[in-house]
Image: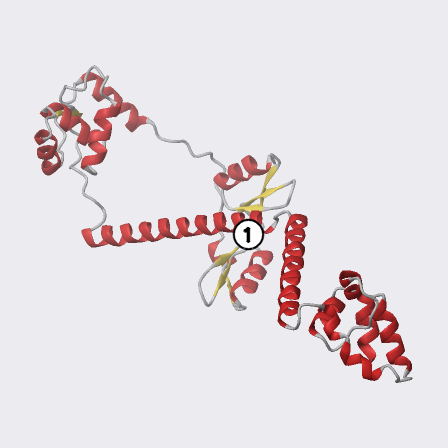
């Protein structure tokens, strides 16, 4: 029985033709091929018609698409394999080359867009230079032609009319997009540019915010403490002036409670004698704990807050 496939002796892959064997050898560097009577598996999906050449490929197709039904067409597609290496026919190319050398080809001026040619001539370009620029820039736009002239201004043959063979003569290419499509494309490009610009601005703002967040924290805290102390002194002076001008006026309210024997009042009295208001006023009398000045002073002392938690 004639062989219907080529089998790779290194990996065991079945190949339909010599071309596939050559491609397999180039990809894997395997060179051990032999003729085999085993046909290449051909499983066709009944849902979408995709051919699968192995069980693994069919399993992958099932996982991707969910198609589970396959038709086995291995015997229908099996054909005897030809071991002859196909050769590229070069006779036609050689005949064309011989004909071109024997008979000179007829050269003609290429066709270009007349509107672009008129615009370039109106700008002051010679006809030959304008035609050459439009032809080699692809007949696309006026800007492309002008750019080509600027780039090739030093060419010696820039003022010569371009010539192309007759068999290569191609009509002027037309724009592939209609004006409406070009407008839509321009709008899409503009939106993309605006989106990229907004992203760039957001990144710049984020960097600036990160730099500003890490401000010298020690200096900031020190400045806040100084401001708090100054504000406290200002308020204390205002209350002192408004309520009598001296801390001693707040001591009279406790004169009637001196005879109280409650231990909590004793603790308050002893603490007030050593507290901050006495040190500021330089007096040893007891201050009224309900006074605004006394309470303001007590906020500055942790011992005051601990003492009056139980009042």
Q: Is residue 289 left or right of residue 164?
A: right
- What residue is at 62 percent from the left and 36 percent from the top? 32
Quadrant of res 91: top left
Percent of width and height locating residue 54: 57, 55
Residue most extreme to the top: 156
Percent of width and height locating residue 153: 22, 20
Percent of width and height locating residue 294: 74, 71
Percent of width and height locating residue 3: 54, 45
Foreground of the two, 2 or 137: 137
Foreground of the two, 51 or 2: 51
- What residue is at 47 percent from the left and 35 percent from the top? 84
Foreground of the two, 292 or 287: 287
How many C-alpha atoms fall within 10 Å of the one at disc 1: few (<14), some, or many (≥20)? many
Classify mark 1: helix, strand or loop.
loop
Q: Is 123 situated above or below 80?
A: above
Quadrant of res 12: top right
Q: Can residue 6 be seen here? A: yes
Residue wearing tag 1: 39
- What residue is at 90 percent from the left and 84 percent from the top? 262
């Amino acid at each position: 029985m004639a062989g219907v496939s080529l089998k790779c002796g290194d990996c065991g892959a079945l190949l339909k033709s010599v071309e596939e064997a050559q491609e397999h050898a180039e990809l894997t560097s395997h060179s051990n091929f032999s003729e085999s009577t085993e046909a290449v598996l051909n499983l066709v999906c009944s849902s979408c018609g995709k051919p699968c050449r192995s069980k693994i490929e069919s399993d992958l197709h099932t996982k991707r698409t969910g198609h589970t039904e396959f038709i086995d067409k291995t015997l229908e597609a099996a054909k005897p394999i030809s071991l002859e290496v196909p050769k590229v026919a070069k006779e036609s190319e050689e005949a064309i080359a011989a004909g071109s050398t024997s008979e000179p080809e007829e050269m003609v001026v290429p066709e270009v867009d007349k509107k672009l040619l008129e615009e370039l001539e109106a700008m002051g370009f010679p006809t030959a230079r304008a035609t050459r620029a439009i032809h080699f820039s692809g007949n696309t736009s006026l800007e492309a032609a002008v750019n080509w002239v600027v780039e090739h201004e030093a060419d010696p043959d820039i003022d010569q009319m371009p010539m192309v063979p007759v068999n290569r003569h191609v009509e002027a290419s037309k724009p592939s997009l209609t004006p409406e499509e070009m407008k839509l494309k321009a709008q899409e490009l503009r939106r993309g540019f605006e989106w990229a610009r907004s992203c760039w601005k957001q990144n710049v703002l984020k960097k600036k915010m990160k730099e500003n967040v890490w401000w010298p924290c020690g200096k900031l805290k020190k400045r806040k403490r100084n401001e708090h102390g100054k504000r406290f002194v200002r308020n204390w002076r205002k209350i002192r002036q408004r309520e009598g001008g001296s801390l001693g006026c707040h001591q009279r309210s406790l004169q009637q409670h001196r005879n109280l024997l409650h231990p909590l009042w004793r603790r308050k009295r002893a603490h007030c004698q050593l507290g901050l208001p006495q040190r500021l006023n330089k007096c040893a009398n007891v201050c009224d704990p309900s006074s605004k000045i006394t309470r303001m002073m007590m906020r500055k002392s942790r011992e005051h807050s601990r003492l009056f938690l139980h009042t």
